[in-house]
Image (cartoon, coloured by chain):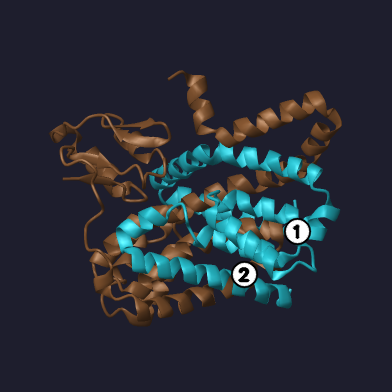
């Protein structure tokens, strides 16, 4: 696939918007100019906040001891487990689907149904860097109110769900591996394209069409370490090795 | 820069400096990871930001006020909530979009409903969630999230 085609495929929305502007520019130049002017304010605000959100996400990732938190989610962890699930969700990076494999792993290690609901919901809604973004565009008061209401709702939802869904209702299979033959495998569904595995072990992983792919199945003594490191570091636990 | 953003910058930069002093390698590799994630979202972010301009040009404040303004009904809120369920855009770009609607005169009730279902209810990710946690769990979690999104929105409308 040529580079241009790949770019279009990966950035459908952007390409669509560019075409919309070109169309307006030719047929309704005043509307195109107006649209640009309207967008400018939001572009400016985004430029001011984006680097700091990126930096904060990175710092949280580096320093929040998620491993310790995960250890406190086991059986009979009670209220403490609920709070730890809430914290883990709040300090994680990536979209909700990235939380599925991690939650599943924690579940098989003994985390309760209510803790899984708390983890998935906080992961989705109340991430710290996102709260700051929300405060920026909608005001601190709006953000604080929504945060409190959402947090209360999440705990209620966890309680209600645990009344209806028992442990046995949740399938116990492991994260599904599409192909039996491949020893080293990346789940396309869960790869969030952070490029980390490619940076750690370029000999084995490659980015292709917004997803990381395994390019080399042969793991020997020389590169065992880097491959293991890539599996360990993957933020959505999308890499499996059988 | 508004005071809020300024404080945010200050705290983060101080933390960054401490982080670099404590563990340079760890800090840099973590930054590489999050910028990798950001790079893949960049096209979407820029696209949405410029889409906001088009929306605001063709949907003047009067129209937005008429359909999603203070007098908007529960139906509007439900529609916004449904749109949130089926949309899969990063929350990151949803906030400027939501902000632009509120600035143009939309009531916060439908906007909050949209923001909450956008992140918490996933129709697109439903099959994935079902695969890992079963139909019952997924159905209950998503329906509860939808109901609570509406409740949160209504309370916000009264409180703010």
Q: Residue A155 at x, y = what percent? A: 46, 77
Q: Colour of chain A?
A: brown
Q: Quadrant of residue A41?
A: top right
Q: Are marks 2 and 1 on the same chain?
A: no
Front residue of this view, candidates B27 and A57: A57
* Residue positioned 37% across, 58% down in the render: B129
Q: Residue A153 at x, y = what percent? A: 52, 75
Q: As drawn, is B14 to the left or to the right of A215?
A: right
The residue tagged 1 is B102
Q: Residue A160 at x, y = what percent? A: 42, 79
Question: Mark 2: which secondary structure?
Answer: helix
Asked if B66 appears above or below B140 in the picture, the reply is above
The chain holding disc 2 is A
* Residue positioned 32% across, 37% down in the render: A200
Q: Colour of chain B?
A: cyan
Question: Mark 1: which secondary structure?
Answer: helix
The residue tagged 2 is A146
Alpha carbon of mark 2 to alpha carbon of mark 1: how far?
Answer: 15 Å
* Residue positioned 56% across, 38% down in the render: B42
Front residue of this view, candidates A192 and B35: A192
Asked if B130 appears above or below A238 in the picture, the reply is below
């Amino acid at each position: 696939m040529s580079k241009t085609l790949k770019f279009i495929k990966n950035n459908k929305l952007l390409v669509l918007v560019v075409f919309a502007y070109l169309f307006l520019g030719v047929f309704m130049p005043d509307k195109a100019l107006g649209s640009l002017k309207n967008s400018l304010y939001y572009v400016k605000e985004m430029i001011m906040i984006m680097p700091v959100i990126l930096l904060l996400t990175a710092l949280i990732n580096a320093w929040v001891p998620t491993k310790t938190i995960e250890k406190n989610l086991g059986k009979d962890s009670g209220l403490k487990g609920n709070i730890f699930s809430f914290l883990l969700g709040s300090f994680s990076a990536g979209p909700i689907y990235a939380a599925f494999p991690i939650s599943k792993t924690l579940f098989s290690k003994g985390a309760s149904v209510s803790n899984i609901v708390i983890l998935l919901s906080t992961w989705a809604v109340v991430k710290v860097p996102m709260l700051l973004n929300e405060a920026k565009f909608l005001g601190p008061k709006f953000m604080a109110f929504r945060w409190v209401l959402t947090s209360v709702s999440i705990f209620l939802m966890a309680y209600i769900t645990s009344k209806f869904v028992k442990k046995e209702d949740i399938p116990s299979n492991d994260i599904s591996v599409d192909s039996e033959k491949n020893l080293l495998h990346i789940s396309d569904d869960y790869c969030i394209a952070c490029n980390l595995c490619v940076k750690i072990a370029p000999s084995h992983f490659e980015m292709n069409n917004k997803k990381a792919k395994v390019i080399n199945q042969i793991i020997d003594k020389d590169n065992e370490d880097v491959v293991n490191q890539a599996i360990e570091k993957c933020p959505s636990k999308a890499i499996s090795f059988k | 820069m508004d005071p809020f953003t300024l404080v945010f910058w200050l705290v983060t930069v101080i933390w960054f400096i401490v982080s670099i002093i404590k563990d340079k390698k760890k800090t840099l590799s973590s930054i590489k990871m999050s910028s990798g994630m950001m790079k893949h979202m960049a096209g979407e972010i820029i696209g949405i930001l410029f889409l906001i301009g088009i929306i605001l040009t063709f949907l003047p404040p009067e129209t937005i006020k008429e359909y999603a303004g203070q007098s908007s009904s529960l139906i509007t809120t439900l529609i916004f909530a449904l749109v949130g369920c089926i949309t899969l855009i990063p929350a990151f770009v949803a906030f400027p979009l939501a902000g632009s609607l509120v600035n143009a005169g939309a009531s916060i009730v439908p906007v909050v409903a949209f923001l909450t279902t956008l992140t918490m209810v996933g129709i697109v990710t439903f099959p994935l969630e079902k695969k890992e946690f079963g139909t019952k769990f997924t159905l209950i979690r998503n329906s509860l999230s939808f109901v609570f999104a509406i409740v949160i929105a209504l309370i916000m409308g009264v409180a703010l």
